[in-house]
Amino acid sequence: MKNLKNKTVFITGASAGIGKACALAFAEADADLLLAARRIERLHELAEALTGKYGIKVKPIKLDVRNHSEVKNTLSSLEDEWKDIDILINNAGLARGYNKIYEGKIDDWEEMIDTNIKGLLYVTRQVLPKMVEQQRGHIINIGSVAGHETYPLGNVYSATKFAVNALTKSIRMDVLDKNIKVSTVDPGLVETEFSVVRFFGDEEKASNVYKGIIPLTAEDIADAVFFCATRAEHVNINEVILTPLAQASPTMVIRKQ
């Protein structure tokens, strides 16, 4: 297993859920962390906890990945010690709404496209050139089973995750001769803030998504991400798809009464 001590790991959407779980997993392995999210107060709390417990370096940055100029200016103005990023985890993403396409809200579509696709592109475009220059690095994108199979009412969200799947494959082709790893981790039902965000804070609707099953946890996904990041230098994990035991596809879920 590859040693991550003193390696720099950049995680977007690190204030909660999968991003936060990844921060904990990599902190335990003595990696230094560059943590980005819009909710900077949460990041400061997390950074303080991780620094105190593990003695690693942690830099929290307020970042809206949807804003290209903010991404460019924030990342280009980082201190030199933080510009040498070894692992980029493109985790920031969300779903908004649950409607048929002819009833969908344009604002919801734009938020998903801006975050899940354009945000991933903006951050990758800023980080990847340095990896290419140094001939090393690893990009790990957080996708979804919805990027492999669509499901009713999932339309635009699913389209954005199909895009993440395509971009992951394309990026790997583009850097195949640059000694850079590219992976995607694609979960099924994970109980985080995901459904609460999708249903605009409706806790009851959100909890019903996971009713009758034992869903994946953020820590389960972080385990898969960590596995991808710690393989031998000659090994690239292209894609990991993981679901709860009770889920076989986005639409096939066995629920206990």
Image (cartoon, grey):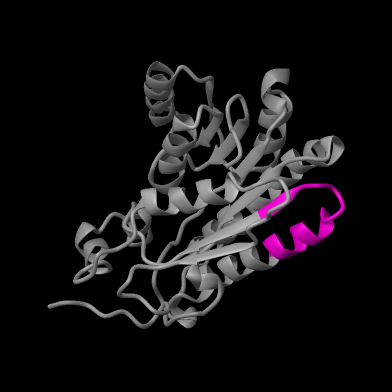
Residues in magenta, as a range: 167-182
| Residue 235 covered by magenta stretch | no
Where residue 5 sits, quadrant-wise, is: top right
Q: Is residue 40 visible?
A: yes
Front residue of 213 and 124: 213
Q: Position of residue 44 (x, y in %)?
A: 42, 23
Q: Position of residue 227 (x, y in %)?
A: 53, 50
The residue at the point 45 percent across, 61 percent down is 95
Front residue of 149 and 179: 179
Residue lying at the far left of the rendered structure? 257
Q: Is 78 on the left or on the right of 174, as rendered?
A: left
Q: Quadrant of the N terminus?
A: top right
Q: Is 77 on the left or on the right of 32, as rendered?
A: right
The residue at the point 50 percent across, 37 percent down is 37
The residue at the point 50 percent across, 20 percent down is 56
Q: Is residue 92 visible?
A: no
Q: Quadrant of the C terminus?
A: bottom left
| Residue 172 covered by magenta stretch | yes
Task: From this view, report whether residue 120 is shown above or below residue 44.
Answer: below
Where residue 217 sits, quadrant-wise, is: bottom left
